[in-house]
Image: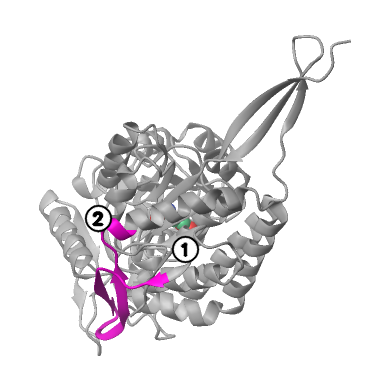
Amino acid sequence: MKCNLIGGEWCAGATSRRNVNPSDTDDVVGEYAHADAEQTRTAIDAACDAQRTWRDSGIQARSTALDCIGTELLARQTELGTLLSREEGKILAEGVAEVARAGQIFKFFAAEAVRTGGEKLPSVRPFVDVEVTREPVGVVGVITPWNFPIAIPAWKIAPALAYGNSVVFKPADLVPGSAWALADIIHRSGIPRGVFNLVMGRGSVVGETMATSPEVNAISFTGSVETGQRLLLQGARQFKRLQLEMGGKNPLVILDDADLDVAVDCAIQGAYYSTGQRCTASSRFIVQKGIYVRFVSRLADALERLRVGHALDPDTHIGPVVDDAQLKQDEAYVGIGRNEGATLVCGGASLDRSTRGYFLSPALFADASPKMRIAREEIFGPVACAIPVETYEEALAVANDSEFGLSAGICTTSLKYATHFKRHVRSGMTMVNVPTAGVDYHVPFGGTKSSSYGSREQGTYAVEFFTTVKTSYTKAYYE
Ligand code: UN1
């Protein structure tokens, strides 16, 4: 059994959980520890004790440890990418690329650790100097989803450690394998005991204990809106710092003047790759009338050609859905779309393959209206809908008519519309002729409205969440 890492020791859980391959449910990836509340508290205490040592260890030690973690991730990208695809179901190329991305993120923050600056300013009072410096927040809880089993943990843990915080990490229950591998690498990187703790287990036990513990100063979370709201309410009692990345219902606008090949490529990559299981996935194609019929038929043709199958088969384009519950949810939305009167152009059927897995053919609805549930609610699967519109102005209004605002794309060859869209679409990230999903690791990530709460993740902007600002006044001499 793979154990939790608490205070530098590998500890068996109170119980354990089996990790199953969604491409082949007969393939058991392993047995992983499940912590109870008491073990979670022990991990929080260990993180608290270790925090001072880590913050005083100096930026070189922190940078060296992060660099070493990044190097190992990059060196083992094929092996760990295979593990990732086996437990999550994204195809091997995506699994390997995700591990490489995690490695790059650690390298990026290894450099950021030695770059953290401050400010020195004159005071409005004579003989006084003012300094503005950054300090670690303290103990940071990291709670991550199943859809990016190593990249999302990396982009929360790397800045947390770089800026001198200690970490209690709770990965998603469905994908403990990548989390355990990352924990093992971090453990061997030379960081002091207790600075990084892995606590696998249920959200209702481990997450809840972290959310209600006054010793956890901050939580960085990616997951559902419902859980995000719960963490926010619980955290409010202790004025906990929170960074929440939640849902999306990302629009991809396609104007009459778009390059059709580019539009179809953006639609496929953005909506269906990674089985559509990304909070940045395009799920609403908002298409101008003049290109609508051509777009829908070209996209449907391309979708029919995509091969759905075992994630580790090199011929597969789309792997399985992550588990039975998610498959049922996707299928339910296909039914909802039909009942609402949208036209199912292709896909939406569960598929039999030589192994037992959760395979679903990529689904495209046409003639959807902005008020339909399939156009408003996050499905989190390979299901998207096309909404016809008359004008650019209508397209923008439909794009903005959502409770979410994470990523928004437009395919156009018009500088005027591209520029207007970038300025007026209400989202944290906007894409012109590139897919809504699949972002760079060195620039800020996050959204508006119900998609995100708190300061941005990633890039140099991560410093805002993982540090607290101190203003010091010094009167060194008096004349
Ligand atoms: C990406 O699109 O490259 O949970 C990243 C998610 C996002 C990450 C998306 N937080 O899907």
The residue at which mark 2 appears reads as 205
Horizontal and vertical percent position of residue 229: 29, 39
Query: Residue 158 bears which disc, if any?
Result: none
What residue sits 54% from the left and 72% below the top? 185
- Mark 2, residues whose alpha carbon is within 10 Å: few (<14), some, or many (≥20)? some
Horizontal and vertical percent position of residue 139: 47, 47
Quick one: 289 or 409, which is closer to the camera? 409
Task: Tell me the magenta residue range.
Answer: 10-39
Q: Are marks 2 and 1 in contact (CB under 8 Å)?
A: no
From this view, report whether residue 424 is shown above or below residue 98. above
Say which element carries label 2. Answer: helix
Q: Main secondary structure of the magenta part?
A: strand
Horizontal and vertical percent position of residue 70: 61, 67
Examine the rendering and report whether any part of residue 151 can be seen.
yes
What residue sits 41% from the left and 45% below the top? 219
Examine the rendering and report whether any part of residue 255 can be seen.
no
Snapshot quadrant of residue 294? bottom left
Snapshot quadrant of residue 169? bottom left
From this view, report whether residue 13 is shown above or below residue 267. below
The quadrant the C terminus occupies is top right
Residue 12 within the segment the image draws in magenta: yes
Three-letter residue code for mark 1: Asp
What residue sits 13% from the left and 59% below the top? 335
Q: Earlier in the sequence, mark 2 or mark 1?
A: 2
Quick one: 232 or 51, which is closer to the camera? 51
Q: Is residue 422 left or right of residue 264?
A: right
- For ligand 1, the image quadrant comes to bottom left
* Alpha carbon separation for disc pair 2 and 1: 42 Å
Say which element carries label 1. Answer: helix
Horizontal and vertical percent position of residue 466: 54, 43
Three-letter residue code for mark 2: Val
The residue at which mark 1 appears reads as 265
